[in-house]
Amino acid sequence: MKHKIKRFKLKRALNLWELSLYGVGVILGAGIYALIGVGAGIAGNAVWISFIIAAIVAGFTGLSYAELASMYPKEAAEYTYTKKAFNKRQFSFIIGWLMIIAGIVSAVAVAFGFAGYFTHLWGGSVTVVAFILLLVLSFISYLGIKESSTFNIVATIIETSGLLIVIAIGAYVFFSKGIQVNLLETPLGIGVPGIMSAVAIIFFAFLGFEDMVNLAEETKNPKKTVPRALVLALGLSTLLYLLVSFSAVNTVGWEKLSSSSAPLTLTVSSVIPKADLLFSLIALFATANTALILLVVSSRILFGMARDHSFPAILSKIGSRGTPTAAVIISGAIALGLSLTSTIKTVAQVTDLSLFIIYAAVNLSLIVLRFKVPKAARGFKVPFNIGKFPVLPALGLATSLGMIFYFEKNVLLIGLAIIGSGILVYRIFSPNPQSA
């Protein structure tokens, strides 16, 4: 028997710039502050090339998200796209399940990053600090999307100003001293393989653009606003990453970057001494901002899937503040539990693997829908097509699948376990699991 669920609607509050800053905020989160040193240790001074390649890979899939969001501006975006393309409820559920897991796990990873900077300044337990942060951010998420967006805009401005300081330092060094290093130098001369290996790691810095479409129902004129905001956020983030990576390697070189736990602080302090406190505070804002957005989006995916009968009806209900209260509580509770039982390395790798699987499914969905519903209204259409066949989404599919081969066996096993648990949850909560 099919359950009848009242259709609760979310309040539309976000305009183009608010949603764009929301996207920039989550993209510019913990990744660039923490991972540029790791990437430099693999790609050397050529790490800036790795950022360009990562941006291209993200761009392929980002364009697919933009077109699909203009067709189906709904919560639980990936779940909706795969359902429309394949009409296989279980497959769509697994994609939505992976998005929920990836979002919550990412929030935990970023909370650990916040805790690392916090304890560097004031001491304490990383686990306890991460737990308290997630508790506070869950409450902010409960307060409502407008309040969360306001916090995000403030934090985005602060974290972006930190990157602009790095760029200013790089400009000073470049115009006063010129190019200081060989920008194509890689460790041990490994060249292209090192650059590509670094892409698999620093891609974490681009994660987040896909989350923007999950706020479509809370965006004004979503068919036009969401695609424009997505392209704008990804473009701005890529420009900043390229300038920051060039500035960092030209200022201190890859050897020092790779050996530092705070590479951007090192870059700035090499010209402006005693900058540790300033950049630690900026990093705290960056990581807190990212964790908040990830928690918000995860709760919205739960809400959207419950509204489509894939989870208990209570998760589809809107509270007095216009937010999906039960979904917010569940997302926060899972994050709090994971913060007590996991490590930042594991959760970051699981996030990347989950999202590359999702990206492959999203790109494939767009290709299928181009043939299945060619005349459907599209506020945005991915360019470069051969007849009905979209070339760029095909490249997005190929690159997403290719990135999966860079993961270690233990991470792949965890990924299989997550998919298996998703199938089990589907069998328990779906009103008609045989319809898969």
Image: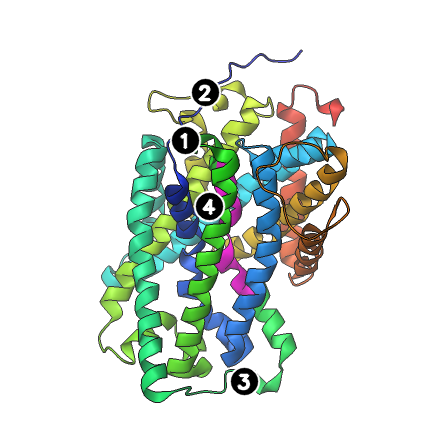
Q: Which residue is mark 1?
A: 329
**Which residues lie in the magenta part?**
201-214
- Secondary structure at numbered mark 1: helix
- Secondary structure at numbered mark 3: loop
State the residue in front, 386 or 271: 386
Q: Which residue is mark 2?
A: 317
Q: Between label 2 and label 3, give the one nearer the viewer.
A: 3
Q: Residues within 10 Å of mark 3 (few under 14, many from 20)?
A: some
- Residues under labels 1 and 3: Cα distance? 49 Å
Instruction: Give yes or no for residue 419 being in the magenta stretch.
Output: no
The answer to which of marks 2 and 1 sits earlier in the sequence is 2
Above or below residue 340? Residue 3 is above
Asked if the residue under mark 1 is in contact with the one under mark 4, i.e. CB atoms within 8 Å, the reply is no
Q: Residue at x 52, y 74 (%)?
A: 47
**Residue 63 x %, y %:** 59, 49
- Residues under labels 2 and 1: Cα distance? 12 Å
Residue type at numbered disc 2: Lys
Q: Between label 4 and label 3, give the one nearer the viewer.
A: 4
Q: Which residue is mark 3?
A: 185
Q: Left or right: where does residue 404 sit relative to residue 151?
A: right
| Magenta span: chief secondary structure | helix
The answer to which of marks 4 and 1 sits earlier in the sequence is 4
Above or below residue 260? Residue 381 is above
- Secondary structure at numbered mark 4: helix
- Residues under labels 4 and 1: Cα distance? 28 Å
Q: Where residue 229 is drawn, which disc sits there?
A: 4
**Residue 226 x %, y %:** 49, 40
**Residue 135 x %, y %:** 34, 40
